[in-house]
Image (cartoon, rainbow, N blue to C red):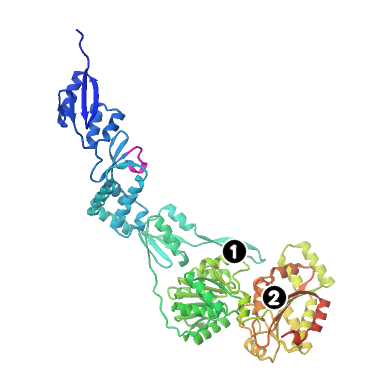
Amino acid sequence: MALRLSVRFRVVINGVEVVREWSWDKILSVKEELKRMGFRWTGDGWVGRVRDPMQLYTLRTLLDLTDDELGRLQQTVQAPRGDVVMVVGEIPEKLRPYVVASYGASSVVSVSRFIRDFVSSDKTAIAQSQSYEDYVRRAAEEFRALLRGLDVRGDLKSAIDSAIEIALSSERLKSLYERRVAWRTVELGPTSAALNFASKELVDELRSFKLAYNIVGKNGEVKQTFIQLVKVSRDKEKIILKYPIFLRNKISEILKKYGYITKISDISYKKLSYRSSVRLLEFQRAALEAWIKSGYRGTVAVPTGGGKTFIGLGAMAETGEATLILAVTKELALQWIERVRKYLGVQAGLLGGGSHDVRDVTVAIYNSAVKYIDELMNRFGLVIFDEAHHVPAETFKEVALALDSPKRLALSATPKRDDGNELLIFEAVGPLVFRASYREMIEAGLVVPIEHYRVYVRLTPEEESEYKSAERSTDNAIVLRNIAAQASAKIQAAIDIIKREVSLGHKVIVFTQFLEQARAIYQRLTEHQIRAELITSEERDRDAAFARFASGLVRVVVTTTVLDEGVDVPDADVAVVVSGSGSKRQMIQRVGRIVRASQGKSVGRVYELVARGTIEEALSESRHVDDIVEESVCKRLSESALREFLSKTSLLEYK
């Protein structure tokens, strides 16, 4: 009789039968282990129940369970209780460190361990958390999100609630959270902040804040460079950030992305009681409301004559805060001071032009503001940049980037700059939030339409020879412009225009680019016994000259570029542009001198003298202001056509 080498061995676990053909020696060792696990012999096999998934792991090894057998057994075992859950199938990489047991394709995952590690090492959610409890719950939600779409066995809500309870009762974990919060907390002042640490990635991102900035060379060439807006340095154990106030919110968002907890620290600016008697026109009110809606930041474009000052006064009355007003000249600064006193009942101080009087409302000339910038910082809640488009970019940059005033208003006839630095204004002060149309200003009774006459004169043979020689030898547009602009025929054309307009009782301003040209016209007017004022940078009695012009005692002012901007000039009826820079901004300002409405005035006239066949023809087109003002007439006249036109011009045609 042959010796049996194997014996049939039957085990029933939770109703699932497992049969093996084993040697008697192996059966003896297995049955002893089954006894310890609570299994009993029924005469036909060993029978028992398993409730703990960990026991399945033991049985898998003990009985050499196949994956199919293990899977059927797992269906009979309740999911883990407490702060763990069972996941069937592939488990995400982020959860693998928290697996406390595995059974075939199933894993037991600890929620508590996940939350503990989250509190210890998370670098993003901590910046959004309001408290330790909020942070723990964010960790739990992160765990829940990782399980989304997986086959989870058991009561997930109960496991998460249990893990949250464990974490909230852990003083050690709470203390760790508080230390991490303190280490990551950054107080963002208006223009600076101190960090305990900073990664290279963060520093690189902060240093990426740059602003394109154009520098104009001596010959008019434009070179682009970049302004570094955020400066990062180390002071002992701290990393110091320096930035302009308009970047603070962006920097806060970046720091949060890197796990910092940011706190905004604002300066409390002095509140003032303005006695506001400002009455805004409809379009002025719309401009102010657009600025308010934009968060008290922005640029407002209103053509000359549209009452930009009143919009600024309205902004002051609206905010009720200490205000710094920046003006380009002393004349305009004094005008601001007078209007602040008249309409708001406050005596403003003057900084610049020989004065150093800084008050809760201060009007500063831009250059003086640069010089005394440390005295102006931390003091004004609102800053108004008047004629922002006219200020040299370097000066504007030094002031706008240094001041910590959160509320900012730029006032401009046109935000477009000759040097292309409009972005500098928009970034430092705020975007264009309102542009007044010329039609709105006409309907408000502030300005009149324009009659625009381009008068084409010819170069003399000598001038033409000089111009063509320059064309062959240089590509410098400024050289060509200067030759064309000083065409001698312009002098006679200007005299003819002035004589006729003065005879009609009109006030005339003559604009030139060159001092010698202005003097020549003034001399010719004197020879024709036409009283005129010559106003250049060399004249000292400008106010007296303006007074004579305003009263009508003198009806002609001949000037250079000194009256282009920044000077309050009495109203005129006619502008004669003999020569200019080719800048549209300059043309807008010159036209602006004759657009203001007055009794009996229905139009303003602009005569633009252009040298035919030269670069001036293209410059005349580029500086055309028909998109800024409303032209009721736009005509081209030759020298002969001009004489015919002037002979027909009468008072009846100029109402």
Question: Can residue 552 be spotted in the picture?
Answer: yes
Quadrant (top left/top right/bottom left/bottom right) for the C terminus:
bottom right
Horizontal and vertical percent for residue 585?
A: 64, 72
Instruction: Give the distance between the C-alpha atoms of the residues marked 1 and 2, in whole angstroms.
Output: 33 Å
Q: Which mark is residue 352?
A: none
**Crowd rating for badge 2 (residues with CA inside 10 Å; few <14, some 14–19, many 20+):** some
Q: Circle 2 sits on which residue?
A: 631
Residue 392: x %, y % from top left: 58, 71
User: Would you identify the image quadrant in which residue 322 lies?
Assistant: bottom left
Q: From the image, state whether disc 1 or disc 2 is nearer to you.
A: 2
- In this rendered view, identify the residue nearer to me: 584 or 392: 584
Q: Where's residue 378, x and y in %?
A: 42, 73
Q: Which residue is mark 1?
A: 214
Secondary element at image label 2: strand
User: Is residue 640 in the magenta section?
Assistant: no
Q: Nearest the camera: 29 or 282?
A: 282
Residue 510 located left or right of residue 276: right
Please state the extent of the stretch shown in magenta in the rendering. 88-95
Which of marks 2 and 1 precedes in the sequence?
1
Where residue 307 appears, as percent x and y from the top left, is: 57, 80
The three-letter amino acid code for the residue at tag 1 is: Asn
Q: In the image, what residue type sits under mark 2?
A: Glu
Seen in the picture, residue 76 relative to 534 is either above or below; the reply is: above
Q: Which element carries disc 1, helix, strand or loop?
A: strand
Instruction: Using residue 564 as the reference point, say whether residue 372 is left or right of it.
Output: left
Quadrant where the N terminus sits is top left
Q: Residues within 10 Å of mark 1 (few under 14, many from 20)?
A: many
Q: Residue at x 31, y 42 (%)?
A: 152
Left or right relative to 109: residue 464: right
> Which residue lies most toward the top here?
1
